[in-house]
Image (tube, grey):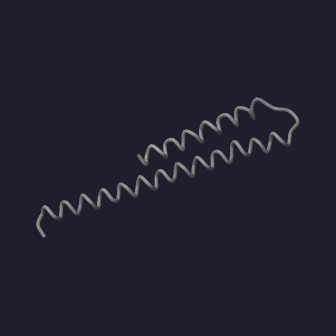
Amino acid sequence: MSNFEENVKAKEEQKEKDKVRKEKLSGYFFNLSQLTYTALVLGGMVLFFQGDKISTMLVVMLFVGCILAYALAKIGNNLLK
């Protein structure tokens, strides 16, 4: 094998490693988005139905949960592009 062929193989292997790394990292952000949504938004909804009044902390928790889940999903999507 020539030196050129070895360099081409090494570059292809590096590209494949980078692709796998990006896919794993984007999957991590998608999972983090799901967990954030579940914990903050759905957890907040449970608190909403258990109580008889709406507190400002509950509204803030729901709002922050939605925004954070969206932001993390957007980051995961941008990594795949």
77 with respect to 45 (left or right) = left
Q: Residue furthest front?
A: 81
Percent position (x, y) of residue 49? Answer: 84, 42
Q: Residue furthest top?
A: 56
Say which quarter of the image contains residue 7: bottom left
Could you tell me which residue is drawn at 61 percent across and 36 percent down?
Answer: 67
Could you tell me which residue is drawn at 74 percent across and 45 percent down?
Answer: 43
Percent position (x, y) of residue 51? Answer: 86, 39
37 with respect to 49 (left or right) = left
Q: Residue furthest right?
A: 52
Percent position (x, y) of residue 68? Answer: 59, 39
Percent position (x, y) of residue 80? Answer: 43, 48
**Is 71 located above or below residue 32 in the figure?**
above
Q: Residue furthest bottom?
A: 1
Quarter of the figure with the N terminus: bottom left
37 with respect to 21 (left or right) = right
Could you tell me which residue is drawn at 70 percent across and 37 percent down?
Answer: 62
Could you tell me which residue is drawn at 45 percent across and 43 percent down?
Answer: 78
